[in-house]
Image (tube, rainbow, N blue to C red):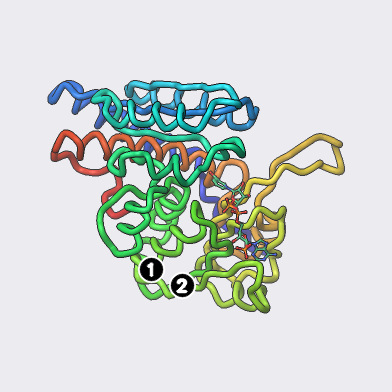
Amino acid sequence: MTSAKLIDGNAFSAGLRDEIAARVREIRDEHHVTPGLAVVLVGEDPASQVYVRNKNKRAMECGMDSFEHILPADTPEHHVLNLIEGLNDDPAVHGILVQLPLPRHIDSQKVIEAIRPDKDVDGFHPWNVGKLASGGIGLIPCTPLGSLMMLRDHLGPLAGMKAIVVGRSNIVGKPMAHLLIRESCTVTVAHSQTRDLPAEVRAADIVVAAVGRPEMIRGDWIKPGATVIDVGINRVVDHQTGKNKLVGDVAFAEAVQVAGAITPVPGGVGPMTIACLLRNTLTAAARLHRLDIPEAHPWA
Ligand code: NDP
């Protein structure tokens, strides 16, 4: 029985962060610019607190400035909007990220649209969404960007390949589909209304799963030799130990027998997301200061 190659997101992201740190040193020494990332968190959601702490820690490890704004859950919307306005005007801040989800009384879309598009390192502002969809140059959402980097690293050029993206969210599925179209793949986007999902998945050379349903995509749906990127992060109880564990949207133990290559969960797409946030912050700083530095992984 064959076993798929594991696409190691921990190793890949560590290499990417080293590359980013070297570029940060370069622009600090030569141009006296230190890229700065501001992260805004509203509320006490424990998972969000962990994400924010990790983002700041990684930014500082790369030599960037990191600005943390942690606000109480009942912060009025206009306070958040005022904070964003200040960050938009702050020359030390090149990237602004608002940790989602926001509390219910705050209109997330309004907050996203308040961020200056050239500092929108999450790539969620309609300006950046439009740039990606129309083939222009903007800032690309981090999770799809990290997924594409792993695909390109493993497969080389993707032109002509059949790809399926399972999930059509604004933060993962849709931008992933646009990136794959840009790579000249033939792209299918599947969702909860898709008829015969197994047959659609079986036709694909590349499977990107971003559903949020533990192990929904079975091994016998995968075309032999296909490359599988599992974006899903699902917390489930391990029946053997009774403890919580993380699994993806793909039944890993089955898929690993059939696929050509696959990302594990954890240790696949997750670490790439933060590395790409840092890459976007570096890119934003370079563009804001009109510095002509080569992009880390320019093809993405
Ligand atoms: P959303 O809930 O926003 O979107 C899920 C998508 O899956 C929807 O388009 C939905 O279809 C589709 N879907 C749901 N059920 C089915 C089904 N039975 N068959 C086919 N499609 C289905 O999720 P996100 O995109 O935000 O996240 C997806 C997963 O990725 C989650 O596990 C999340 O935790 C993870 N994630 C991981 C990140 C990382 O860094 N690794 C970052 C972001 C997310 P419809 O539109 O019809 O409802």
Crowding at dot 2, Cα within 10 Å, few <14 / some 14-19 / many 20+, comes out as many
Q: Position of residue 30 (x, y in %)?
A: 13, 24
Q: Position of residue 278 (x, y in %)?
A: 37, 35
Q: Position of residue 136 (x, y in %)?
A: 26, 59
Question: Residue 276, relative to residue 54: is it above or below?
Answer: below
Residue highlighted by disc 2: 187
In the rendered structure, the answer to whether residue 46 lies left or right of residue 120 reads: right
**Quadrant, the N terminus:** bottom right
Q: Position of residue 68 (x, y in %)?
A: 44, 21
Residue at the image position 42 percent from the left and 32 percent from the top: 81
Could you tell me which secondary element the residue under label 1 belongs to? helix
In the foreground, 115 or 272: 115
Q: How many marks?
A: 2
Q: Quadrant of ligand 1?
A: bottom right
Ligand 1 within 8 angstroms of badge 2 C-beta:
no
In the foreground, 125 or 67: 125
Residue at the image position 86 percent from the left and 41 percent from the top: 240
In the foreground, 102 or 20: 102
Question: Residue 63, relative to residue 168: is it above or below?
Answer: above
Question: Three-letter amino acid code at disc 2?
Answer: Val
In the rendered structure, the answer to whether residue 18 lies left or right of residue 103 reads: left
**Disc 2 to disc 1: CB gap under 8 Å:** yes
In the rendered structure, the answer to whether residue 195 lies left or right of residue 298 reads: right
Question: Three-letter amino acid code at disc 1?
Answer: Ile
In the rendered structure, the answer to whether residue 213 lies left or right of residue 112 reads: right
Residue at the image position 62 percent from the left and 46 percent from the top: 265
Q: CA distance from mark 2 to mark 1?
A: 6 Å
Residue at the image position 36 percent from the left and 28 percent from the top: 37
Splitting the image into 4 quarters, where does residue 17 fall? top left
In the foreground, 137 or 91: 91
Q: Which mark is residue 300?
A: none
Residue highlighted by disc 1: 181
